[in-house]
Amino acid sequence: MSLERTLRIVQVAYPQVYLACHTRHQRKRSTVHHLSARDASILAHLDQQSITTPARLAAHLNVARSTLSEALKRLTALGYTRQIARGAAAGKRGGVGILLTATGAAAIRETSVLETPRLRAVLELLTPAELRSVARGMSALAAGCDRRASPKSLASQGAE
């Protein structure tokens, strides 16, 4: 499939998904999860198994390390993230890594721009093969977005 064809499909399909499943903008610190849009964005970039360093995350999000540090302290106090010594995981040397907790993963599901009940209702209409295809496609698209937002990519974009 050509890049142009894929581009058209994404531009048509994504708004359909968004309109069918988007939340009614309740993500505020006044919600049960006490998450701002920035907090939710930080959580969305974390994983329960793969350690992320604060420095890498700050660069990816294009925020100052001190800004991210304050947010991570708050998210850790709320139980959404946990810090681990990187030396304790897979032979990494020194420093601190950040992991998403199960509570953090639940908060992501419950504060996503795509409401879990609406999205679940749509996904329940798909076959197992279609579900795998959606998961692979969305993961690949998100990985492309992540690569585009990487510090190296951002530096090369600035040179254009």
Image: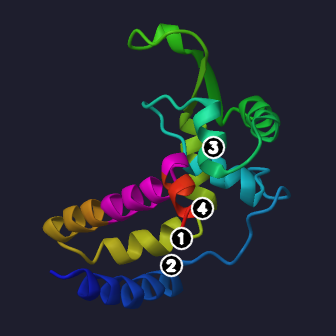
Tell me the CA gap for discs 3 and 4. Answer: 15 Å
Look at label 3 and name its amino acid. Answer: Ala
Tell me the CA gap for discs 2 and 3. Answer: 30 Å
- Residue drawn at x 28%, y 87% is 4
Q: Is disc 1 in contact with disc 2, using a CB cutoff of under 8 Å? A: yes
Look at label 1 and name its amino acid. Answer: Leu
**160 up-or-down from 84: above or below:** below
Look at label 4 and name its amino acid. Answer: Gly
- Image coordinates of residue 95 in percent, x first then y, are 61, 15
Range covered by the magenta-colored residues: 138-152
Look at label 2 and name its amino acid. Answer: Cys
Q: Which mark is residue 114?
A: 1
Label 2: which residue? 21
Q: Which mark is residue 52?
A: none
- Image coordinates of residue 48 in percent, x first then y, are 47, 34
Looking at marks 2 and 3 on the same chain, the residue that comes earlier in the sequence is marked by 2
Label 4: which residue? 158
Q: Nearer the viewer, mark 3 or mark 4?
A: 4
- On whether residue 148 falls in the magenta region, the answer is yes
**155 up-or-down from 113: above or below:** above
- Residue drawn at x 38%, y 13% is 90
Looking at marks 3 and 1 on the same chain, the residue that comes earlier in the sequence is marked by 3
Residue 60 appears left or right of 133: right
- On whether residue 102 falls in the magenta region, the answer is no
